[in-house]
Amino acid sequence: MQELRERLAEVSDLEQAAGTLQWDQQTMMPRAGAPARAEQLATLETVLHERATSSLIGTLLDRAAAEVAGEPSESDAASLVRVARRDYEKARRVPGELKAEMARSASLGQETWERARAQSDFALFRSHLERGLELKRRYVECFAGEFGCAYDALLDDFEPGTRTAEVAAVFEQLKAGLVPLIAAIAERVGTLSEEEEAASSPLHGAFPADQQRALMLGILPRLGFDPAGWRLDEAAHPFATGTPGDVRLTTRYEEDHLGMALYSGLHECGHGLYEAGVAPELARTPLGSGVSLGLHESQSRLWENVVGRSRPFCAWVLPQLRAAFPSQFAGVEVEELFRAANRVRPSLIRVEADEATYSLHVILRFELEQELIEGRLAVADLPEAWNARMRDYLGVEVPDDARGVLQDVHWSAGLFGYFPTYALGNIISLQIWERARAGLPDLDVQIERGELAPLREWLREHLYRHGRKHSPSETLRRVAGGPINVDPYLSYLGEKFSSIYELA
Amino acid sequence: MQELRERLAEVSDLEQAAGTLQWDQQTMMPRAGAPARAEQLATLETVLHERATSSLIGTLLDRAAAEVAGEPSESDAASLVRVARRDYEKARRVPGELKAEMARSASLGQETWERARAQSDFALFRSHLERGLELKRRYVECFAGEFGCAYDALLDDFEPGTRTAEVAAVFEQLKAGLVPLIAAIAERVGTLSEEEEAASSPLHGAFPADQQRALMLGILPRLGFDPAGWRLDEAAHPFATGTPGDVRLTTRYEEDHLGMALYSGLHECGHGLYEAGVAPELARTPLGSGVSLGLHESQSRLWENVVGRSRPFCAWVLPQLRAAFPSQFAGVEVEELFRAANRVRPSLIRVEADEATYSLHVILRFELEQELIEGRLAVADLPEAWNARMRDYLGVEVPDDARGVLQDVHWSAGLFGYFPTYALGNIISLQIWERARAGLPDLDVQIERGELAPLREWLREHLYRHGRKHSPSETLRRVAGGPINVDPYLSYLGEKFSSIYELA
């Protein structure tokens, strides 16, 4: 058991090293460093894969299984052996060269995508995407016989144990709830141009990036951002990474829209709180991180939306916005900020979408990904398919690829099967929120006072500290009391937007 | 040969990955990340060592030696096999656990040293230093029978092929030249207080860090700093690292002294030019970096001092200083700047020392390191020994450990045997400079115009591009025409300071 721990700790160290190099690539690395970085990450992946799949680990796992046979299945030791065994069996199915090639391609893709997006030219990106899909198909083949369909194999890496058909069923229910809600809101709102809407929102205006950054460094510590153990940087596509003691958030500053940095900052901070909250004794083990992307996203969306776009949070944050940008927020009332933070309008960009329309962006990607991986949709036809579905689901016309198919970083890094976890996270966030509310009767008042520690500590106790000890579905059962269920999320949206838009 | 190249490329990738993580630790990492980073670097070192010393590489080296037997010894292929063989034989002597422990200790030492220096408390640092020396003694034992003395084994890692006795002999000549020069200058100058001196120097005053940074980002591109392939950040102890396409310089901004950032920036840029100038075809091989620290330092000191503190460079840079800090440099003449940049005064801090006294700081460390490693000096007695020798060699009283024994980062990272290369670099810089001057008759005029590319390209052609192809002594012979020789350096100092201080 001791030797197993040491070998697994090395695997964890190498994963963290690769994570820091990926962070560096997206935040710090000079552009010309991209080819060398791709080789470094490919080699690191080769080494990592060799160590993670060595027959020594197999032998140690067998012996450790015998050692922990008498212990309760939820003990740290039994969980470690169970989870490490699953990771090991999955990793063993994939050749090291394929993993290295995927790492190299993911790293090189970053720059290709940034250039293609900057020039809004899908043609620059097309062959990289074709290559990425080809690698993914080879990856899927490694699991022949294990999954019901190709997409299941992809999904399992991000939401272990969840299958495509389950997600599709959940998304059907979600869509059935969202479409009439969006239609009802649209009917009330009528048609305002983007400019008219921006003019009436205090979150749009002139906000120098430096001051936005200072504002965020004032707000985030209330959630749990510790300057001795956290960083905040800029990235083209905000993300969070790190481990306890070294949590790294990124955000993006749009100088004409404060909402971008404010809400992406809260979002990434939610991810950071989860990683920082894993029990210290699980560090350097396979249990020492968040259990699935759906659960992870439930936390980023909970802090961004359920907390961050609530009336109590708006009441707490408004004086700080006013202090940072006096002329912009002079005379703005809490209700006005609350409405600006919750304005519903079908739009082009997923990460800027409101809560009502957001999940439709995800469903669109979920469908396109299945068609791509199964070969039913050619990469060359992707922009057209994207644009048609945006028209269909959200009624918006995509003016260019930068604001269409090129907007997200994920596919550049070979992340297929990742998007659905965003909408799963939305759904789960409300299941958890209902439980937290029940456990913290004064929650609204606490948030209004900026006392965010009680909520964070409740989440740490019930979710964060367990890391990967339990399966995602068992983790969800423990923190939210049951399997995934869209009702709390749809009720929450219905109540919030009925109050804002005075729906029947 | 092809397989050997692939295996060596992996070793090079892992070295670069570790280099970036070390850079990150000194520039970006939150403090609380230190323990986890130490584990990551230790594991990376374990993996690196395993791969670098695998018997597979030994077998491939044997086969490759046969393959290149007919090629000239200075061909890329023959050089690769020769250098890789030497690296392999050295690395095989050291157990992987010791290398990992040294990497862990070096990483942990960074934070310990920063804290000890901030509090000027040697006691906080003492046990770390004792541990580091203990590890170094175990390291030296791995080479039993190979070297004439313990210090030889340390020196060989930084200046391969050079022995302690040779360095001691060269330093004797250096000291014999420097001591009377410093005395003659002191006689002319008399005694000015530090405050009086600062008041009369345009490099002392009020310089906001942001503006210093902007100034450096204006100056460094003239040397060859390419924003698409380089970065400039801050570090407690400035250093440079990286590879072509991803060169990372650091500097330190002292808001009351522009000289710190200006000259440490030029210094680190010299290191960067060397690394960036290695021939692209040597990338990801053991030949793809600078050949020794002495040669490396010859380049940082050449750009910092021989170029940066010259009259022509002062003439070129002054208008830029004036544009950045108008009130500070209004009315300042070139000669005044030149004199300020070349003011000689025995002082406490090595990295701020003038060219005349600098090497004495190094000689002091060279002597103390030998006594420490041989056990003739106990760590507990080090501050006292440091202070006594500072009094002896430079006539200055050390007021506290922060400005004494704790000023340098090196010992925290286990870097013993490194310091002498700084003074060797001073000496070598002038040997190379004389050759460059002979090859570039218009050099002074070019520098005065800020045309630094011809010098850089001369150095690239004669030194940088060869990387580690030739041994350090052969490299020196090729670029400077002979073995190490203190005369050009002493003549240069004598002429420069005779002109400034009107010595006989």
Image: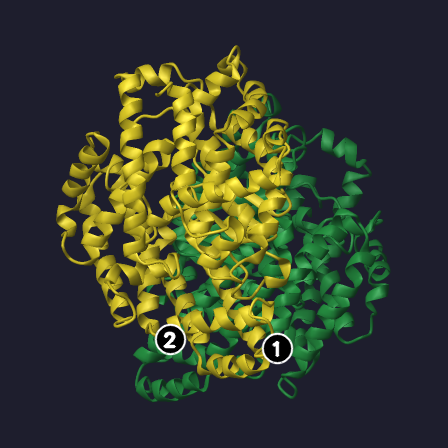
Chain colours: A yellow, B green
Residue B480 tag number: none
**Residue at the disc numbered 2:** A92
Q: Is residue A268 visible?
A: yes
Task: Say above or below: A382 vs B208.
Answer: below
Q: Does the CB distance between marks 1 and 2 fall below 8 Å?
A: no
Q: Position of residue A350 (x, y in %)?
A: 33, 37
Dot 1 or dot 2: first in sequence order is 1
Along the line of sight, which residue is nearer the eye, B110 or B453?
Answer: B110
Residue indicated by mark 1:
A2
Whether callout 1 and callout 2 share a subunit is answered: yes
Q: Residues within 10 Å of mark 1 (few under 14, many from 20)?
A: few
Q: Is residue A27 above or below residue A17?
A: above
A124 relative to B436 in the view: left or right: left
Q: Is residue B307 left or right of residue B62?
A: right
Which amino acid type is marked by label 1?
Answer: Gln
- Compared with A173, A504 (above or below) is above
Q: Secondary structure at mark 2?
A: helix
Percent from the top left, x then y, of residue A492?
43, 33
Residue B458, image quadrant: bottom left
